[in-house]
Amino acid sequence: MKRTDREKEPYRVGVLSVVKHDYLPRAIAAHPRFNLSFVSDERSRPEWTHERNQKFADEFGIPYIKDIFAAIKDNQIDAVAVSPEAERHCELAIIAAEAGLHIVVDKPLSTNTHKCDKLIDAVNKNGVRCLVWNRNYLPALIQANQKVNSGELGQLLSVHCDFYFSKDAGPPIGSRKANDPPIEWLDRQLEAHADGSDGGVGTEPMGELEVEGIYPLAYIKMLTGGAKVNHVFARTKSHFHQAHFDNDVDDLATVTLEIEGGITGSLSIGRIGAASHPDIGEIKLHIIGTKGSAVISEARPEVSIYYRDQPVTEFKNQRIADKNNYLLAENFARSIDGTEKPILDCIEARDICATVSAAIDSSKTGKPVKVDNRKK
């Protein structure tokens, strides 16, 4: 499908589960190129998933259909927004691709490269577009990309990203008493939903590398012109949170990247707790080229707001000029039109998944690991 006339009817979008975060379908609904048609999920899902799906459907005045295949068959739609538990991202996206529907899917695409490969095959076979949600349209990232592409810094030599979220994730490490049972991952994620710290919702425990690693790795991939990571060396630890320790997943990691073209990359990532930082966290890019270097804070531009009786959960530092969600939805619409490529597609997200997997393997062996990139 190629449609360049922006005055034509909006694309109709079905929402396939909205139990992880609702920012993705909300961003699609807020864009004038799209209309939401329904929310759907499988009837066999747990009751908490139906509650979240129904609440979202009621807010937007659209039906909630407990049968994905029936919902797709009985409604004329052009695309889907996929935001279930992370372990179901590829599963639901494949259903959509096989039905000839374009896909925007929440991150991470998966923690399993084989699932990613099945999705890529379905997307290629059916000629649809797939955008994986990311943060590459933040003002700071746009500026960083412009600096690299302009040649102002010369030939790119290395990129480092600090990506520390100052969010809590339940009780601090060491707080569990000797006779207390380990924290159940899903129970903790359901509890965390109220404050938005449930990024790893689902039955499969996910560390910070798996949940958030796609963001800094997508930054690095964009800034290096899509270059592939060949080898990684990583260290990971459950350092801050009891839930991560009990489920043997990381909340703190460092990763060194050997990238095509002789570029060196690295990232430090963690969910470091609300008491550790006055802002949302320390998120910065450090870029070095043959002619110069730059340090760019991801949160800028921002303003600080303080007032009496301010809720403790309200961020005092608030980003401004942030059109990331709108621009991602715009990119998705133009991808469907056939005039742009997704800024982060399922092939790139699959290689990021492979990089994360290699990093976790490296942290266990203490040795560099070759990344299993997809063969062309």
Image (cartoon, rainbow, N blue to C red):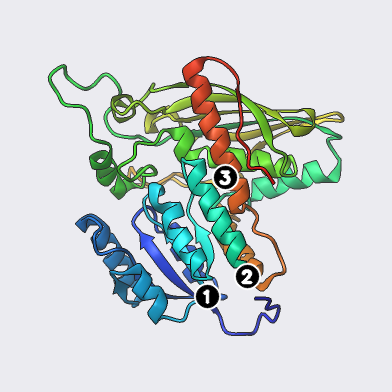
State the SS at label 1.
loop
Q: Which mark is residue 24?
A: none
Corner quadrant of residue 147: top right
First in sequence: mark 1 or mark 2?
A: 1
Q: Is residue 7 above or below residue 273?
A: below
Corner quadrant of residue 183: top left
Q: Residue at x 85, y 28 (%)?
A: 290
Residue that protrudes farthest toward the bottom in the picture: 8
Q: Is residue 322 left or right of residue 296?
A: left
Q: Position of residue 20 (x, y in %)?
A: 37, 52
The one of 17 and 135 positioned closer to us in this rendering: 17
Amino acid on which the number 1 mark rests in the picture: Asp
Q: Residue at x 57, y 16 (%)?
A: 367
Between the residue at mark 1 and the residue at mark 2, the CA separation in whole angstroms equals 9 Å
Q: Which mark is residue 336?
A: 2
Q: Is residue 152 above or below residue 319?
A: above
Callout 2 environment at 10 Å: few (<14), some (14 to 19), or many (20+)? Answer: many
Amino acid on which the number 3 mark rests in the picture: Arg
Q: Which mark is residue 78?
A: 1
Q: Position of residue 142 (x, y in %)?
A: 69, 50
Q: Is residue 130 left or right of residue 39?
A: right
Residues at circles 1 and 2 in contact by the CB criterion of under 8 Å:
yes
Judging by the rendered image, the residue that carries numbered circle 3 is 350
State the SS at label 2.
helix
Q: Is residue 141 left or right of residue 102?
A: right
Amino acid on which the number 2 mark rests in the picture: Ile
